[in-house]
Amino acid sequence: AGTAKAAAQAAAAKPKGKYVEYPDLVVNLTNYSVMYNGRSIDMPPKELELLYFLAASPNQVFTREQLLDHIWGYEYAGDTRTVDVHIKRLREKIKDHEAWALTTVWGVGYKFEVRQP
């Protein structure tokens, strides 16, 4: 019963909808595509899922453990630093924008920061 409850909580916490859109950035989970500055960006599924998850909850801080649970699943046995590696790769592909950025919250985790105009 405990695993069913955990699975239900995880499903409830996942972002609703299949795409998020910001100035110069569209992340589409339906067809696993990312448009950045008007061009398609190739990225592995986990990077795309991580970007989508963060962008679907703007300004919310997530710990590495929360991101591992949501993107890699509760059974993931690897190092939490895999999140750092994926964030680094995302930052190489998706540069900060005046309207948004992938932000490190030191000692806590990461967030997709939406900046006020």
Image (spheres, helix red, strand yellow):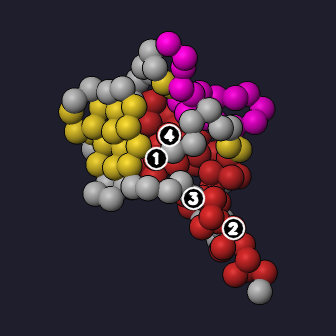
Residue lying at 28% horizontally and 57% vertically, measured from the top left? 31
Residue lying at 48% horizontally and 24% vertically, measured from the top left? 100
Reading the image, the residue beneath label 4 is 55
- The N terminus lies in quadrant: bottom right
Disc number for residue 14 = 3
| Disc 1/disc 3 C-alpha distance (Å) | 10 Å
Callout 1, which amino acid? Tyr
Residue lying at 72% horizontally and 72% vertically, measured from the top left? 6
Reading the image, the residue beneath label 1 is 52
Callout 2, which amino acid? Gln
Reading the image, the residue beneath label 2 is 9
Which residue is nearer to you in this view: 107 or 55?
A: 55
| Disc 4/disc 2 C-alpha distance (Å) | 20 Å
Q: Earlier in the sequence, mark 3 or mark 4?
A: 3
Query: Can residue 93 be seen here?
Result: no
Vertical arrangement, residue 75 with respect to residue 117, above or below: below
Callout 3, which amino acid? Lys
| Disc 2/disc 3 C-alpha distance (Å) | 9 Å
Secondary structure found at label 4: helix
Query: Can residue 102 be seen here?
Result: yes
Residue lying at 78% horizontally and 32% vertically, measured from the top left? 107
Q: Is residue 24 left or right of residue 69?
A: left
Do the numbered discs 1 and 4 sit on residues whose CB atoms are within 8 Å?
Answer: yes
Read off the magenta span. 102-117
Q: Earlier in the sequence, mark 1 or mark 3?
A: 3
- Determine the image quadrant of residue 58: top right
Q: Residues within 10 Å of mark 3 (few under 14, many from 20)?
A: few
Residue 60: x percent and y percent?
65, 38
